[in-house]
């Protein structure tokens, strides 16, 4: 029998059992274990998971940071935080973690899902203002103040732009069938056709004006540049380079003309398709080559010297044997010696404007990294030799051929490209002299490129001949950044989309005309931006356009303008077009010079004429300035001013503002009561969303800028003839100029009065200024 147990400190011995029955022990403690487990898994309302931990493990941070708890308890703790209305605040990863190469690449791929990035995007993003336009992320303008510098580069040096957002569409088939296909969407009055003798051999790049099927002169899509691939076979390839704002419309038009077979179709299925009567058109294949080529634009007289220094032409086939695409092409078609000799002859030219216009040269060049200088230099043509003009004009017939247009060869070139890390390692290990690069290195493959000459401005009436001339270079995908760095190191100044618009303005060209869908979308986008910017200003800082007699300060109402100038009473114009008939435009210019009546044209009441406007004396022109019809005494009056108009909405705005102020006091009291009733938890869970403007804001905006505009012709004291879509100070002419559109009937009315000058007034001014007009041909 066991003795009694007592405290050992008081004396005596303690006798314990030799073994313990675990089952019996657990059974006696089962109630306590179940209670403890239940309290941890399902805590009471007054106790949270982190409060159930031992005191020595508790931390104050646990209430909002779940990572301070043991991993087994984190999930339940997060659920409790969500129920309490306090979403967990996850700390942003450190910059060191985010800048790891693998994480950077993953982030870049995620951001490219919404907007397509060009190969030079990273380079531009560090130096340019980037904008999202036409599903692309495009460089707009340099971060430094380089507007004048970019103009100097385009006129005297070299301006470099990445226009790889132009999408290539490949059309393959018999020439006669392609000509028949494009006959319904083009018109011969606008210029040479797509199958003209000047372009069909592939020696020159051409351009056409594209319309919707059988809708000329309405339904304008845009100006498309094209290149024929040199080929003696009956089946030929045609590459269309389409602006991204017009690509969807061009694809839709081509789908309406013919049916694309399943194996060659690269578009989404179209519900409505129309067959032509000629079933031979089904032999034509169409592919959209998105991201297949890089296209860089070099503008300025120094662009030729930069290309001559950057591109090292391959002269014999022995140097091509290291390139893997060499076995996939017929070496006899490359004509390396002829191209090398012609390129050596034209390298001595001082400017690209001296070469044949729109000529195409297909070269095979060495890797541009081999010719890149160690520090930035300015490439110049130091040759003062006299050049035989016959050598420049006699372009070899084989000069335009390039293996770049073959899809399989282009894929091989892209896959076999040596990246920069491997290139640096290779040069460091293999170079014989430190700092010197071996240009004939067999480890680097040769690259086929295509050069396209741009003649620049050819209108001697009001522009400098050759301004805007340069080269376009088409490069296979993957080599964009390598060529870009080389051109920059040889002294090219980089520009963006802003420089494209300013170049078109300086050359007197129409950029995205208003009768196209792309031009209308661009106008609406700018209209919304300017309108929001206007209403963001306080009322005391806003221009009162009603008093100035301006109906639409940020938008051109072309349909209303044409309806007002229609000779028929109550005529409503639903569609309009810009005149592009070259013969008629030449006649219009002659009539303008001799002050004669314009010849008749079809749909005259729906016709707009593109004009170039130069201010006669002093003054500055702005965008959306109104072009007005002068009266007899206006030509000698230098102080012609628009009289101030009555603003009938001014009193209404004041009354509405006072009424709104009194309502705000009542609403404020109601909001305070609601805040007191609402719990703090509910207030924290409310998400701030961008709400639409209130009814009061909409009504006030309507009183500032009324949208119900019924007429624009008689909105001022002088009749409105048209609007300016582009206007600024022209550096090439050293005066303020603009590009705009005038209604045909309005221009005819001006010439009937025996005058050929017009009045121009900015939307923020009351001053009328005299200006000269020139028809853009």
Image (spheres, rainbow, N blue to C red):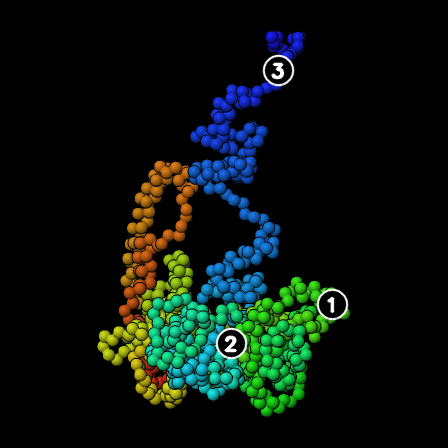
Residue under label 2: 731
Question: What is the secondary structure assignment of the residue under circle 2?
Answer: loop
User: Which residue is found at the position 50% from the left and 23% from the top?
Assistant: 30
Left or right of 530? Residue 27 is right
Q: On the image, numbered disc 1 is attached to which residue?
A: 430
Asked whether, in this view, residue 289 is left or right of residue 423, the answer is left
Q: Earlier in the sequence, mark 3 or mark 2?
A: 3
The percent position of residue 367, horizontal first and vertical second, equals 64, 72
Which residue has dot 3 on it? 17
Task: List the single residue furthest toward the right.
Answer: 433
Category of crowding for the residue at label 1, using alpha-carbon neighbours closer than 10 angstroms: few (below 14), some (14–19), many (at least 20): few
**SS category of the residue bearing label 3:** loop
Provide the secondary structure element on which disc 1 rests.
helix
Q: Is residue 539 above or below residue 299?
A: above
Q: Quadrant of the N terminus?
A: top right
Image position, residue 583 (x, y; %): 39, 87
Spatial CA span between label 2 and label 1:
50 Å
Q: Nearer the viewer, mark 1 or mark 3?
A: 3
Q: Image quadrant for the C terminus?
A: bottom left
Q: Residue at x 39, y 63 (%)?
A: 528
Task: Tell me the quarter of the picture where residue 4 sits.
Answer: top right
Whether 539 is drawn above or below 471: the answer is above
Please state which of residues 273 and 307 is positioned toward the viewer in this rendering: 273
Residue 222 or 580: which is nearer the viewer? 222
Contact between marks 2 and 1 (CB within 8 A): the answer is no
**Residue 299 percent across, percent down from the top left:** 55, 76
Left or right, 150 with respect to 531, comes to right
Cα–Cα span, label 1 and label 3: 83 Å
């Amino acid at each position: 029998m066991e003795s009694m147990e007592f405290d050992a400190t008081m004396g005596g011995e303690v006798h314990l059992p030799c073994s313990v029955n675990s089952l019996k022990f657990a059974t006696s403690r089962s109630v306590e274990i179940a209670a403890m487990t239940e309290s941890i898994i399902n805590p009471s309302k007054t106790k949270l998971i982190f409060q159930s931990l031992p005191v020595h493990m508790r931390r104050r941070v646990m209430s909002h940071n779940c990572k301070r708890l043991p991993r087994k308890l984190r999930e339940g703790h997060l659920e409790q935080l969500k129920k309490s209305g306090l979403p967990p605040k996850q700390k942003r990863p450190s910059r060191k973690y985010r800048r790891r190469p693998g994480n950077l690449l993953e982030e870049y791929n995620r951001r490219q899902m919404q907007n397509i990035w060009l190969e030079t995007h990273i380079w531009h993003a560090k130096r340019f203002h980037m904008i999202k336009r036409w599903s692309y992320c495009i460089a707009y303008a340099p971060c430094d103040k380089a507007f004048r510098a970019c103009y100097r580069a385009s006129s005297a040096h070299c301006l470099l732009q990445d226009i790889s957002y132009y999408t290539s569409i490949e059309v393959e088939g018999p020439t006669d069938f392609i000509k028949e296909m494009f006959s319904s969407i083009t018109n011969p009055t606008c210029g040479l056709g797509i199958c003209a003798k000047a372009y069909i051999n592939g020696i020159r790049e051409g351009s056409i004006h594209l319309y919707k099927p059988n809708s000329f002169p309405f339904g304008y899509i845009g100006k498309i540049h094209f290149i024929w691939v040199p080929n003696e076979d009956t089946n030929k390839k045609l590459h269309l380079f389409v602006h991204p704002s017009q690509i969807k419309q061009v694809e839709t038009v081509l789908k309406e003309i013919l049916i694309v077979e399943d194996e060659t179709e690269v578009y989404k299925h179209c519900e409505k398709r129309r067959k032509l009567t000629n079933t031979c058109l089904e032999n034509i294949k169409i592919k959209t080559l998105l991201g297949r080529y890089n296209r860089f634009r070099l503008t300025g007289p120094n662009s030729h010297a930069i290309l001559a220094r950057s591109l090292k032409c391959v002269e014999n086939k022995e140097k091509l044997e290291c390139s893997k695409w060499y076995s996939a092409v017929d070496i006899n078609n490359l004509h390396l010696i002829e191209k090398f000799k012609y390129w050596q002859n034209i390298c001595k030219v001082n400017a690209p404007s001296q070469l044949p216009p729109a000529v195409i040269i297909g070269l095979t060049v060495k890797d541009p990294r081999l010719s890149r200088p160690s520090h930035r230099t300015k490439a110049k043509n130091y040759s003062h030799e006299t050049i035989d003009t016959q050598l420049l004009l006699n372009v070899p017939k084989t000069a335009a051929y390039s293996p770049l247009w073959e899809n399989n060869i282009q894929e091989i070139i892209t896959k076999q490209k040596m990246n920069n890390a491997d290139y640096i390692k290779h040069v460091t290990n293999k170079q014989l002299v430190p700092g010197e690069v071996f240009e004939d290195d067999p480890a680097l493959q040769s690259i086929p490129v295509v050069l396209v000459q741009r003649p620049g401005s050819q209108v001697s009436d009001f522009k400098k001949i050759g301004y805007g001339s340069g080269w376009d270079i088409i490069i296979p995908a993957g080599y964009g950044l390598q060529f870009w760095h080389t051109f920059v190191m040889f002294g090219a100044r980089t520009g963006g989309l802003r420089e494209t618009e300013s170049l078109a303005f300086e050359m007197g060209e129409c950029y995205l005309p208003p009768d196209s869908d792309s031009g209308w979308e661009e106008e609406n986008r700018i209209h919304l931006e300017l309108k929001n910017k206007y209403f963001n200003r306080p009322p005391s800082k806003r221009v009162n356009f009603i008093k100035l007699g301006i109906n639409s300060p940020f938008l051109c109402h072309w349909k209303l303008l044409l309806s007002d100038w229609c000779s028929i009473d109550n005529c409503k114009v639903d569609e309009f077009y810009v005149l592009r008939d070259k013969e008629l435009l030449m006649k219009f210019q002659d009539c303008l010079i001799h002050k004669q009546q314009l010849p008749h044209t079809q749909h005259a009441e729906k016709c707009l004429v593109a004009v170039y406007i130069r201010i006669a004396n002093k003054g500055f022109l702005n965008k959306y300035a109104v072009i007005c019809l002068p009266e007899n005494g206006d030509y000698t009056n230098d102080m012609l001013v628009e009289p101030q108009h009555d603003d009938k909405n001014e009193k209404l705005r004041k009354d509405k503002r006072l009424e709104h102020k009194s309502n705000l006091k009542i609403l404020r009291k109601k909001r305070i009561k609601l805040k007191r009733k609402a719990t703090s938890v509910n207030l924290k869970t409310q998400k701030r969303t961008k709400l639409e403007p209130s009814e009061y804001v909409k009504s006030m905006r309507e009183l500032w800028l009324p949208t119900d505009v019924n007429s624009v012709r008689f909105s001022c004291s002088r009749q409105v003839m048209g609007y300016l879509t582009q206007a600024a100070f022209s550096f090439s002419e050293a005066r303020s100029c603009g590009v705009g559109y005038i209604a045909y009937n309005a221009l005819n009315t001006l010439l009937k009065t025996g005058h050929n000058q017009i009045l121009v007034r900015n939307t923020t001014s009351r001053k009328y200024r005299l200006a000269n007009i020139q028809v853009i041909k």
